[in-house]
Image (spheres, rainbow, N blue to C red):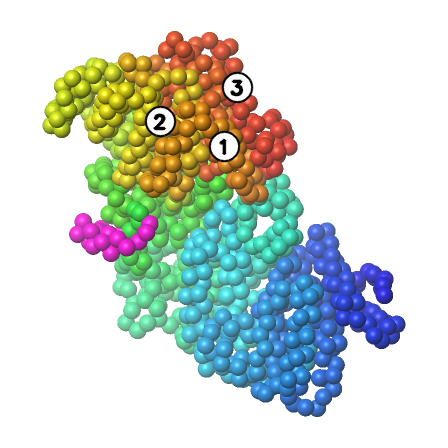
Amino acid sequence: MKHPVTDISSDPTQATEMFREQIRVAFRENPNLSRDELLQIFRRHLGRIQTQVRTDFEKNRLSGLQASKQLTAYTDGLMVVLFDLIYHQSLKSDDDKNKIAFVATGGYGRRCLAPFSDLDLLFITPENPSKELLKTIEQHLYFLWDLGIKIGHAIRSITQCLTAAKDDITILTALLDARLLRGNQKLFDRFTTNFVNLCEEIGATRYILEKSKERENRHKKFGETPYLVEPNIKEGKGGLRDLQTICWEYRITLGSDQFSDFLTPKISELGLLTEQEIHRLQRAHNFLWTVRFQLHYISGRAEDRLTFDMQPVVGGRIGYTKHGQQVGVERFMRHYFLTAREVMRLTYVIESALTLYTQKAKLNKFESGKYIPHTGCTLLEGKILPTAHISFEKDPIEMMRLLKLAQTQKRAIHPLAVHQLIRWERKAAQLRGDVEASNIFLDLLCDTPTFLSPKARYKLLQKNDHQEEKNTIIYPPPEDQYNTNWLHILNETGILGQLMPEWRRMVGQMQFDTYHIFTVDQHSIEAVKLLAMLEAGYYQDDLQFAHKLLQGIQSKRALYMATLLHDMGKGRGGDHSEVGSEMALSICSRLNMTAEETDTVSWLILHHLLLSHTAFQRDIDDPKTILDLVDTIQSPERLRLLFLLTISDMRAVNKKVWNAWKATLLTELYNRVAEVLEGSLATQERDTRVYRVKNNLTKQFSIINIPNTDVDFFMHLGYASYWLSFDENTHIRHAQMIIEAHHKQAPLTIRTYPLPDRGVTEVTVYAADHPGLFSKISGALAVAGASIVDARIHTLTNGMVLDTFWIQDAAQDVFDDPLRLERTVELITSALAGAIDIEQRLQDCNRNMLYGRRMRAIHVPPRVVIDNQASNGFTVIEVNGRDRIGLLYDVTKTIRKQKLQISSAHITTYGIRAVDVFYVKDVFGLKIQDKKRLSIIREAILKVLEEIEENITGIQPNSTASIIQMEIAPPKEEL
């Protein structure tokens, strides 16, 4: 029988009565109504409920929080009607064994449902329920499952509820939100009475401690900072779960009937939050629910992670559009991060106040004998708290003195004191230019952890030997207070933004790519933290050289200040290095730094990408590359500072960016530049350097008994560039390989050599020169699953070619599995012999590689730059495009078609974007000077990149339509 679909009332109570009447009519018309027909009626009503709430929400008639409560009210109606229908016989029974209380718990119990949330249900039964009741409950559950409703359920007696709650804090928390939907009121009242007694027995102090530990573990799993660029709005730091946790703690401390959106008489009694602060929490709560509803509706599932593909869509639906330099998605995410910060800092304050309340402590009563003389501060729970004599409002310098005291005393600042800093942070604007405030800030900025002696470091490394992860970072003790602690307090309270108004623009500013995992402000603080740890001896093995350098620098304050401000210019238009450099001049002057320090900070920010750009995207064996750096850097001290800033910046991007190979390249570049700056050997003395290399090699060959005839043969093969491109050990490996191939007259020889210390595997191919050799080898390596990070191509005097590739696995580590190495050699051999179709194999690899919506959401605009100034002997082609399997093969094949010879290739990836740099010559061994030909070369490579991007994202070249309104920045914006 078909039943007409009626419009649902906007009033949930009225809608429930209309639905109940619809059920009555259906049964009157057909007393033998089947279960399937009844299911269809309920499904239609459930669909109307969901449609009504979604329509009201998307037409902005309901906010997120209102929509969650409206959805709960409608769902209650459906549940009540179904309950009355299923339990009508049990409800009429006088048998106590048939009594039941149908209870909502968890999010459903507190009337906060998201569109695809689970419904948490509790069936409270007598101690010995009848079989009929249990069978009826089973029928009830099957009906709900058949309706398509996701439920979490429990069937327990009162005793079982209390036992489970006592053993598991999670169950106790869920029962805090218990709300009777239908059934026996007396049974539920008896449960409530016993549950309240249990809560009093457990005690608020224990409960708050358990929830605090639970929150800490959750933050470790979902991110220990709210400033992750893809946050989890429910479980992440500053998310909905943190708000819910403080609500549970509030209710168990002050009574379950005392909470209603933070507006209760008790909140005033605590004297903790102002009315304005309460409203800020309410706005945050509502905003987070609005975002969550959007996420659920857009994804069509219970999705709580704000991923890249979701951010522009959610932001657009809420109403964020481009404003000035900021696109809509940036403005939306900044609002989210500021909201998360508000939640994070106020919830900690409330929790601390509740803990004191449970201990019957008064906020103006301090620990006996714990007054700190001559400071105006005392200790509460072992943490520093100003007394009533200290007024941040009247004397803002006391804010900075409080931080200095905490640094001196090696103690934490009490959350209530932090709250006072938040409340009066605007007064800190009066401290701009204040000498005492500036000196305290710079002392805090340069504060490092307790120094880790070499002996203690060795013990920690031995302790960590069992860990699978290589180069595990050694962290200072958790209780250690150093600069990252003070910077977090200054940033989260807002004081840092008052001291430096330019900083406020950085707070919550996201970087819309897969390369950075933090917002700009958090990335900067992370860089300072890593620098401090490096100075104190908490570093991984590949940073020992940097640690030693840091011990001898003369401009410590300038280095730490430049590290903090290096990305200050982001989001302001133009080159962020140039913008930030200009801003640093006024900031450092305001902080009363010396003219020399100010100049150094500005210079470091201007050039903070110079070393990484050169090491990873230029041929450091080219003398002009080194000379250009020397002309820019000019002093050994500046080189040391720039090197240390570069390392801290890179390591703060994300854990995957830094590896042994990059450490090797940067250190090698540093040494070459330092060598020239110190005047020991000029790069122009090329012949002298070649002579020294050959002379040392001859001595080594005699030691390992290589015949003189073979030595002479090898020594006459390489041109000058070859001898200056490799270290002594690599030359020896090449000699043994080439001499063996010469004796065997082998047309092709391939060797692989893992280099764990550098984090790469060296693949060397010795073969007869022919067109497309480099391209085919790179294609074969891609098919083998190897990622090429660097390559050198050397044509020898005997007409053979020595191609050297340095490769890593997908985890950016040494490619050293014996079976994979054997397969790699086979693939290269087959590719060069024409036995396999490289292009077809690469297409198969890419077809199996899924580009999820999250990756496709970010447009990687293809870019080709040709530079004839970077090298005296080569034309440098820089290629920017989406990283994919076989990208290097496609580009090098195009370069070959343009009749160019590749001398070296340098490959770097930034998230999903690759930057490949090639040093090339024409067929006559000359730089390409003709502008028309350079344009043809550029267009040919660009066409390949555009086709790749269009196939993945569907965005046509030069199209104004884009999946998002923001593109990944060019290379200079990377770190």
Camera-side residue of 723 and 618: 723
Camera-side residue of 167 and 286: 167
The answer to whether 824 is drawn above or below residue 13 in the figure is: above
Q: Is residue 587 visible?
A: no
Disc 3 + disc 2, Cβ < 8 Å? no
Q: Tell me the CA gap for discs 1 and 2.
A: 20 Å
**Which residue is at 53% across, 19% downward?**
940
**Which residue is at 48% across, 37% downward?**
912
Helix, strand or loop status at disc 1? helix
The tag on residue 842 is 1
Q: Tell me the CA gap for discs 1 and 3.
A: 20 Å
The amino acid marked with disc number 3 is: Ala
**Which residue is at 20% across, 16% downward?**
713
Q: Earlier in the sequence, mark 3 or mark 2?
A: 2
* Residue bearing the label numbered 3: 940
Camera-side residue of 937 and 974: 937
Q: Earlier in the sequence, mark 1 or mark 3?
A: 1
Please state the horizontal and vertical placement of residue 516, each as a whole percent of the image.
Answer: 45, 41
Q: Earlier in the sequence, mark 1 or mark 2?
A: 2
Foreground disc of the pair 1, 2: 1
Query: Would residue 608 appear left or right of 261 to someone viewing this image?
Result: left
Foreground disc of the pair 1, 3: 1
Q: Which residues are magenta?
A: 446-469
Inspect the magenta stretch and tell me whether residue 458 lies in it.
Answer: yes
Please state the horizontal and vertical placement of residue 541, each as a whole percent of the image.
Answer: 25, 44
The amino acid marked with disc number 1 is: Leu
Helix, strand or loop status at disc 3? helix
Give neighbour class at mark 2: few <14, some 14-19, many 20+ (Cα, 10 Å): many
Query: Would residue 70 appear left or right of 561 to someone viewing this image?
Result: right
* Residue bearing the label numbered 2: 791
